[in-house]
Image (cartoon, rainbow, N blue to C red):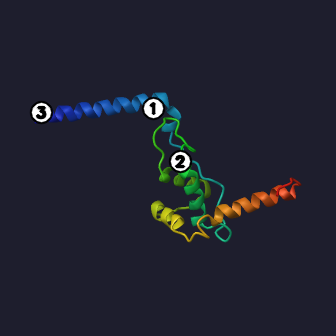
Amino acid sequence: MKIIYLDKLLSLINMEQELIYRQMEYPKFFINIESDWKSPFYLNNEVIKIVDIMELVCGIFYIKDGIVRIDNKDIFLSDVARIFEKMFNINFGDIYKKEIAVIKRKPTKITEFLDSLKVAIIKKSRDNGYNHL
């Protein structure tokens, strides 16, 4: 029993050492600024719905290696979603249910928001005098 306890204790000490090493290597990731920072931006729900933002989140997340962490750890859909939640002061609720709501849409609506972004960019480009076919 003592051997198991000592083994667990050594494991805990090793993990604490690893954490301290990471804090020294990447100190800015261990500074908690979440409680102090609040985005000044809010989503206008009459124009852009939460599921539209999730469509954007999914699109960015699905591009392999499009977003990487400085410490090269895996990135999850929830990580990308949390960034958008903080940026627009929104709450997706169950992120994976919202993802399913995006990917199970009808074929004509599956990228409806992304298509509207494309149209808006093309319109702005044309309005500024750039030639597009």
Q: Earlier in the sequence, mark 1 or mark 2?
A: 1
Residue position for label 3? 2
Residue 40 in the image: state x and y as whole percent.
66, 55
Q: Amino acid at mark 3?
A: Lys
Mark 3 element type: helix
Q: Residue 131 versus residue 54: which sits nearer the camera?
A: 131
Query: How many numbered circles does the render carry?
Result: 3
Mark 1 neighbour class, 10 Å CA radius: few under 14, some 14 to 19, many 20 or more: some
Mark 2 neighbour class, 10 Å CA radius: few under 14, some 14 to 19, many 20 or more: few
Residue 20 in the image: state x and y as whole percent.
40, 30
Q: Amino acid at mark 2?
A: Glu
Residue 56 in the image: state x and y as whole percent.
60, 57
Q: Is residue 76 above or below residue 2?
A: below
Mark 1 element type: helix
Tell me, yes or no, whether the two marked residues, 1 and 2, touch with CB atoms within 8 Å. no
Q: Residue 114 appears in which quarter of the rendering?
A: bottom right
Q: Which mark is residue 23?
A: 1
Q: Is residue 4 above or below residue 37?
A: above
Q: Residue 9 appears in which quarter of the rendering?
A: top left
Please tell me which residue is depicted at 70% across the width and 60% down the height of the picture.
117
Residue position for label 2? 34
The C terminus: image quadrant: bottom right
Q: Earlier in the sequence, mark 1 or mark 3?
A: 3
Please tell me which residue is depicted at 50% across the width and 32% down the height of the picture.
27
Residue 128 visible in the shown view = yes
The N terminus: image quadrant: top left
Q: Amino acid at mark 1?
A: Gln
Distance from disc 1 to disc 3, alpha carbons, whole Å, reads: 31 Å
Task: From the viewer's perspective, tell me whether residue 124 is left or right of residue 54.
Answer: right
